[in-house]
Amino acid sequence: MKVKLDISSEILEDMVIIEARSMSEQITHLVTYSQNFDKRTTSLTVKKGEQIYLVDYASIVRLYLQDKILQVQTQEDSFTSNLRLYQVKDMLPVHFLQISQSEIVQIRQLDHLKLTPNGMVKLFMKNGSITYSSRRYLKTIKERLGL
């Protein structure tokens, strides 16, 4: 993908222009990212019991659904969120990867992975937790990790 940058004092308003041969998942993500760039936060509001915390994205290991409730796991602790997984996905930085319909992991927190004979990926996280991808997301995982 080529990137072109034009800087000029004659430009009245900053604008991002994306030119592509066809619409793809990458282009869709790029458009969403660009539209929400100035709205981005660096933390996620979560709960543990009655207490509310702001958890930095960098400390999140994985986000997953358990009994229809979003669980947010960090290196040290686990929290819940009232948000839906798709809502959080749009807020997360690019180093997060959806590995199944109900789970997102942070690539930077990934220790190593193993391809299983049945076409799934077994992911070992730096905090010692283990999770599995679904076959549906295998292509995306391989592309993002350069496999």
Image (tube, grey):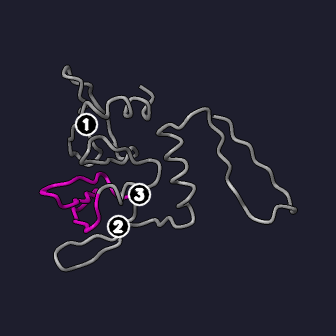
Q: Which residue is mark 2?
A: 55
Task: State the residue at coordinates (57%, 55%).
Answer: 34
What amino acid type is highlighted by mark number 3? Ala
Cβ–Cβ under 8 Å for marks 2 and 1: no
Determine crowd level at label 3: few under 14, some 14-19, many 20+ residues with C-alpha closer than 10 A: some
- Residue placed under numbered mark 3 in the picture: 58
> Which of 62/17 is in front?
17
> Along the line of sight, which residue is nearer the eye, 14 or 73?
14
Q: Residue at x 41, y 57 (%)?
A: 58
Q: Which quadrant of the view contains residue 76?
A: bottom left
Q: Secondary structure at mark 1?
A: loop
The image quarter in which residue 110 lies: top left
Q: For marks 1 and 3, give the one nearer the viewer.
A: 1
Q: Is residue 136 above or below residue 57?
A: above
Residue 30 spot, x, y in % from top left: 54, 47
- Nearer to the camera, 74 or 63: 63
Which residue extends farthest front? 22
Q: Quick check: 133 left or right of 28?
A: left
- Distance of mark 2 from mark 1, alpha carbons? 24 Å
